[in-house]
Amino acid sequence: MKNPNAVPPHPIRADNKTREACWDLPADPEAVGKARGLAHEVLTAWDMSSVAENVTMVVSELVSNAILHGKAPITLALFQYGRVVRGEVTDHSAGWPNPVPAGPEGEHGRGLAIVTACADRWGVVPASEGKPADGKTVWFVCAEWRSR
């Protein structure tokens, strides 16, 4: 799937203030709530509460997709570059995110629309260049100035 918002996988650093956090998650639906909590906790510690709502919403959708459509192991990583947060959800399935139409009563099909609405940019890259069977990383960027 080509994303019109796609940019190179790593944003330009705004300054030297860089932090990162990374977690391995089980392929279990309960991991979605855990991932949201971990993201919120680290964003608060990083004084990035202004983007916490958008980041946790995107994390929730991407971790859900990795559990439903991906293959374990699943990893969530967050990086702070100045006043920008970049998130990555990696799984080991060759299948890339694919938007599906959501009917008014449908339970699925809104996740990538939510990601697009909450993130400044997002995209997908192979986890290992040239080896799509090794999985993919879905990344997103949320900037503080957008959240105001």
Image: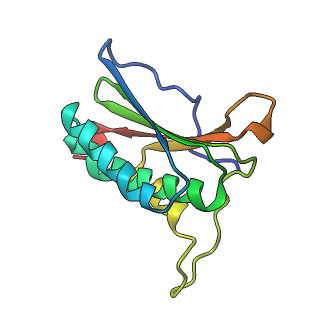
Q: Residue furthest top?
A: 16
Using the rendered view, name the quadrant where residue 20 is placed: top left
Left or right of 38 on screen, residue 76 = right
Residue 131: x percent and y percent? 80, 33
Residue 70: x percent and y percent? 65, 53
How many discs mark residues in the rendered view? 0
| Residue at x 20%, y 33% (from the top left corner) | 45
Left or right of 23 on screen, residue 18 = left
Q: Is residue 108 above or below residue 69?
A: below
| Residue at x 75%, y 28% (from the top left corner) | 129
Q: How is the image coloured?
A: rainbow
Residue 98: x percent and y percent? 67, 59
Using the rendered view, name the quadrant where residue 132 is placed: top right
Using the rendered view, name the quadrant where residue 114 is placed: bottom left
Residue 78: x percent and y percent? 40, 34
The residue closer to the viewer here, 12 or 136, is 136
Q: Is residue 140 above or below residue 107?
A: above
The residue closer to the viewer here, 127 or 86, is 127
| Residue at x 52%, y 26% (from the top left corner) | 10
Left or right of 6 on screen, residue 39 = left
| Residue at x 30%, y 23% (from the top left corner) | 82
